Image (cartoon, rainbow, N blue to C red):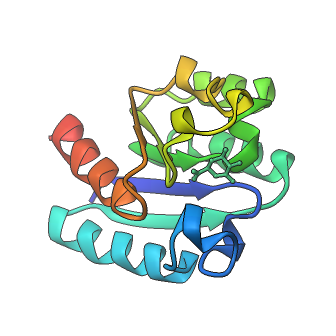
Amino acid sequence: MPRILVLNGPNLNLLGTRQPEIYGRETLGDIERACAGLGAELGLSIVCRQSNHEGQLIDWVQEARGEAAGIVVNPGGLTHSSVALLDALHAFDGPVIEVHLSQIHRREAFRHRSYVSLRADAVIAGCGADGYLFALRRLARLLA
Ligand code: DHK
């Protein structure tokens, strides 16, 4: 089964309690369980990781080279600042889908720019936790 890395960045461990009016009431655990469930249906093996540390996220992206077929990434605030995460994703060959729970383009101007979008094959924003599931469906199609 193709392996998919579902990567979440800073503060996403607080989902469910962190500004729920923006990020929703589902916890990261809820999202990861839903991803695993849909992955099983789609014939994808799902590996979920979350870190508040940029270097750890970069290490996981590097490890995904040759290991994972695709990546779903919500880089949290690093979306708008991390050239290093962008560079790591550029070194990964498979499809990359960027997910944001919130509709970042309706928020503060600094959230409108995403470094990761320069690499992402698709970007999903404003669909809440469903965005991760849409991303997995898209990856399943791209990898078929
Ligand atoms: C999550 C964050 O933590 C923010 O820093 C981003 C993103 C948006 C989201 O909507 O999932 O700006």
Please state, as top left, top right, bottom left or bottom right, where the N terminus lies in the image. bottom left
Q: Residue at x 50, y 40 (%)?
A: 66
> Where does the image place residue 98, in percent across and percent down from the top left?
48, 39
Q: Quadrant of residue 142?
A: top left
Nearer to the camera, 46 or 34:
34
Tell me if 102 is positioned left or right of 38 in this view.
Answer: right
Above or below, comparing residue 96 to residue 69 in the picture: above
Nearer to the camera, 103 or 70:
103
> Where does the image place residue 32, in percent across and percent down from the top left?
47, 74
Nearer to the camera, 70 or 124:
124
Above or below, comparing residue 31 to residue 50 in the picture: below
Nearer to the camera, 125 or 143:
125
Above or below, comparing residue 66 to residue 113 in the picture: below
Q: Quadrant of residue 129?
A: bottom left
Q: Residue at x 62, y 27 (%)?
A: 112
Tell me if 43 is positioned left or right of 32 in this view.
Answer: left
Tell me if 102 is positioned left or right of 60 in this view.
Answer: left
Above or below, comparing residue 90 to residue 14 in the picture: above
Please state, as top left, top right, bottom left or bottom right, where the C terminus lies in the image. top left
In the displayed orientation, state which residue is furthest to the top: 118
Q: Residue at x 55, y 30 (%)?
A: 92
